[in-house]
Amino acid sequence: MIAAIALALAGCTTPPARTGGVVSTNPCADQLLLALAPDRVAAISHYSLEAGEGSVPLAVARRYRGTAGTAEEVIALKPDLVLASSFEPAATLAAYRRVGLRVLTLDSPTTIAASRDQVRQVAAALRRPAAGDALIARIDAAVAAAAPQDAARPTALLFIAGTLANGGPTLLSEMMARAGLGDGAAAQGLTMTAAVPIERIVLRPPAVLLEPDPSARVAVLRRQVLAKAGYRVAEARFPRALVNCGGPTIVPALARLAAIRQAVVRWNLMPKPRQCSCESRNPGPRTASPVTLGSCFRRSTAQ
């Protein structure tokens, strides 16, 4: 279908009239667009409109029109700019350009520095350099605030989903290091993001497990196995929404990681661990707020 559209548009020489809006077809591009130029949004990706799929709060995302990102749909919106992923099909990108749409393709930054550069790039394309500078200043402030004030570096293993753990030179890895957490993935032999079975964790357990959902079956099983093996391992929730993207997400992600580290350090000094549940002590929606971290902290102990 996309190829057919591209061929059909091959003879078009006059670009369609522009609406002045911007279309984003990727959830990480969505959050950049909303952070830098919310008044120019023509449509965002459907991912951000689905619970648990994006980095933009669902209530915010649902104020805007969504798009499945097909060439037909995006072209019909006649945007001034399309923010697309470098992973988008080549035929789709070619169809945009064939009708004269301005397209900016974005990759996935693997460092904070690369994320800063991407913010500048998108801000320039949106003609909002001041907004870009302001966001970069917030990122720099978050990096400074997350820096630990002592030498403790509790090892952490961050799970993205199920048994899939973050590893290798990723943006998440840098943020964990900046927040003062040791590399628990390296201790598991990871050089890239990969599955880590419970059997391997038992051999070299980290100081803390970061889980997207501590109530999920696989997280509960990890907790039970570690407890029966006699290990005392802390556990904290690190929401999936903080995993996917850089840019604006770096700010709350660093704050969360720093709060987790501080809680682990304090918790290791406690003579007797206290079991607690974020579900029972947090009647409202579960959030990533560092203020509620203490009540969302668990410790696996030998039974």
Image (cartoon, helix red, strand yellow):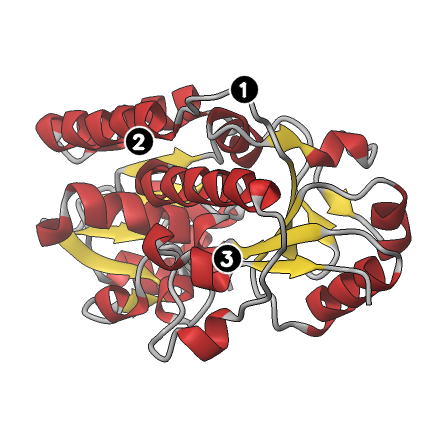
Q: Residues within 10 Å of mark 2 (few under 14, many from 20)?
A: some
Front: mark 2 or 3: 2
Q: Position of residue 31 (x, y in %)?
A: 30, 49
271 lies left or right of 257: right
Residue name at image x 40 percent, y 60 percent: 69
Looking at the picture, tell me which residue is in the foreground, 197 or 148: 148
Labels 1 & 3 near each other (Cβ < 8 A): no
Q: What amino acid does circle 1 point to?
A: Ala
Mark 2 or mark 1, earlier in chain: 2
Q: What amino acid does circle 2 point to?
A: Ala
- Separation (CA) of disc 1 from disc 3: 28 Å
Q: Where is residue 252 in the image (x, y as percent from the top left)?
A: 34, 45
Looking at the picture, tell me which residue is in the foreground, 110 or 125: 110
Give the structural element (helix, strand or loop) at label 1.
loop
Q: Name the residue under label 3.
A: 240
Mark 1 or mark 3, earlier in chain: 1
Looking at the picture, tell me which residue is in the foreground, 42 or 108: 108
180 lies left or right of 249: right
Q: Position of residue 270 (x, y in %)?
A: 57, 47
Is residue 269 visible in the rendered image? The answer is yes
Residue name at image x 21 percent, y 66 percent: 64
Labels 2 & 3 near each other (Cβ < 8 A): no
Give the structural element (helix, strand or loop) at label 2.
helix
Instruction: Using the image, determine if residue 89 lies above or below residue 8.
Output: above
Q: Name the residue under label 1.
A: 151
Q: Name the residue under label 2.
A: 142
Q: What amino acid does circle 3 point to?
A: Arg
